[in-house]
Image (spheres, rainbow, N blue to C red):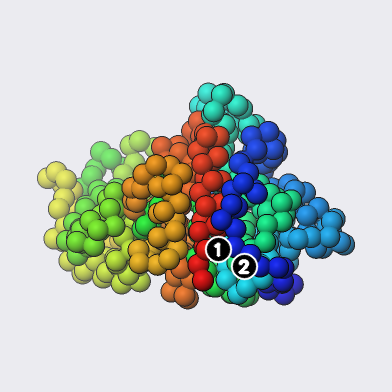
Amino acid sequence: MAPLHSSSMSACSSPLLKDVIGDLDRHSYVALLTKLIGESEYVQNNPPKYKPKENRVARHVLDVLLPLSTTPNNGGGGGPLVVQHITNPKYPERGNVIAEYPGTGDGAVSFVGMHMDVVPVVNPKDWKFNPFSLSVDGDRLQGRGTTDCLGHVALVTELMKRLGETKPKLKNSIYAVFICNEENGEVTGIGVDMLAKEGYLDALKAGPLYWIDVADKQPCIGSGGMITWDLKAIGKQFHSGLPNKAINAMELNMEALKVIQTRFYSDVPPLPEEKKYKYATPSTMKPTQWTYPGGSVNQIPGECTISGDVRLTAFYSPTDIVKKLYAYVDDINAHIEDLDTRGPVSKYVLPDEGLKGRVEIKTGEEIIAGIACNLDSRGYHVLSEATKEVIGFVEPYADTGTLPLVRDLQDEGFDVQLTGYGINDVYHADNEYCLFSDMKQGFEVFVSIISKLEEDK
């Protein structure tokens, strides 16, 4: 399908746009979110165990928007929305949805990044409620995806629905881009990366692009880069009663990782720019998983792997850091005898057998750079003004959470700004929830942004 292009309506600025569109309707929003959370079990994303089918969510979005669209062969009702469902043919159950409310001019305002997959629920029994069914407790809307990110999918769907119903006269075209495959990078070329590569997002360069996948109702002005890594130690397996005849891969890996982390923190220190952007943490490197082939407790393992990630502030290049990691490992292997040992018979070289332990590092294929948003852009100023107007204050922040492609979009000329209305404390956590009152304020912020940008000449 061809990339979207704006079509024409009569132009008029909309200083009273809020009165035209109104507030977020609780009944409509909760009804839609109920359907989306009901699909969350089937859009968990962590292959090979969890292979999401985001079209299960997309069909509910399409059910709301197509009756207000100009696509008669797909259930359209004559406009004014232009709706596309875009899927890579290799993954027919994993699609994206782009909706446009056309304006008369060349400007654009876009809401992007609302993803239709979720992180897995490790153990549903650990939850206080069913994670795969929306439960309502007063203001709290509970279930997997309410904060990240099905709550935002429902929110922006409701925004586009109201635009389609009320048909305000706008100069700027309003876009909503609902994406698949945000939570895992093992599969590529099917989500926002495909949309950007194939030109579906080109029209969005004509105005601010608001990435809606963060939390706490404030502008997020910086995100993190990410490198995943596996550090494998290879020693010699032997009986634990004869440790002098073994090269303990676990000890080797722990000591090697200590050296690597020490050098990393020396080479990647906190930077002054991180204070300006209010990063919650500097760049970090840490282990998160440990695996080995198996064996009994009286066997010293000859092989094991420690896995983890590097999180970088936006001011470091991930590709440069990858080079450093490989250089650290090469240096360790060249001087394996110099590694600290543990106890009088712990060693990483068996001269009589001509054996040396070694470590190998492998970094993940997907390397993501962080973003520092442009704080001088009109898009940021409007977001700040709208946030203060609706929320009552503005406290921008940054962290090393990772968002796919946002840095690439910025490098290609998009004015990328980040915001969202979930709860930061439950991101990727058990007992996930959002607040309807927060989403209602998010709706007001979006309407205010659209209205303020309409006032620009």
Frontmost residue, 131 versus 155: 155
| Residue at 68 percent of width and 66 percent of height | 102
Q: Is residue 231 visible?
A: no
- The CA span between labels 2 and 1 is 6 Å
| Residue at 16 percent of width and 45 percent of height | 342
| Amino acid bearing label 2 | Lys
| Amino acid bearing label 1 | Glu
Where residue 192 appears, as percent x and y from the top left, is: 58, 64
Q: Is residue 233 left or right of residue 12?
A: left
Q: Where is mark 1, residue-wise?
A: 454
Q: Where is mark 2, residue-wise?
A: 171
> Which element is circle 1 on?
helix
Q: Is the C-beta separation of discs 2 and 1 under 8 Å?
A: yes
Q: Determine which of the numbered discs, if any, sits on residue 236 in the image.
A: none
Q: What is the crowding at mark 1: few (fewer than 14 residues within 10 Å), some, or many (at least 20)? A: many
Where residue 325 appears, as percent x and y from the top left, is: 29, 66
Closer to the N terminus: mark 2 or mark 1? 2
Q: What is the crowding at mark 2: few (fewer than 14 residues within 10 Å), some, or many (at least 20)? A: many
Q: Is residue 299 left or right of residue 178?
A: left
> Which element is circle 2 on?
loop
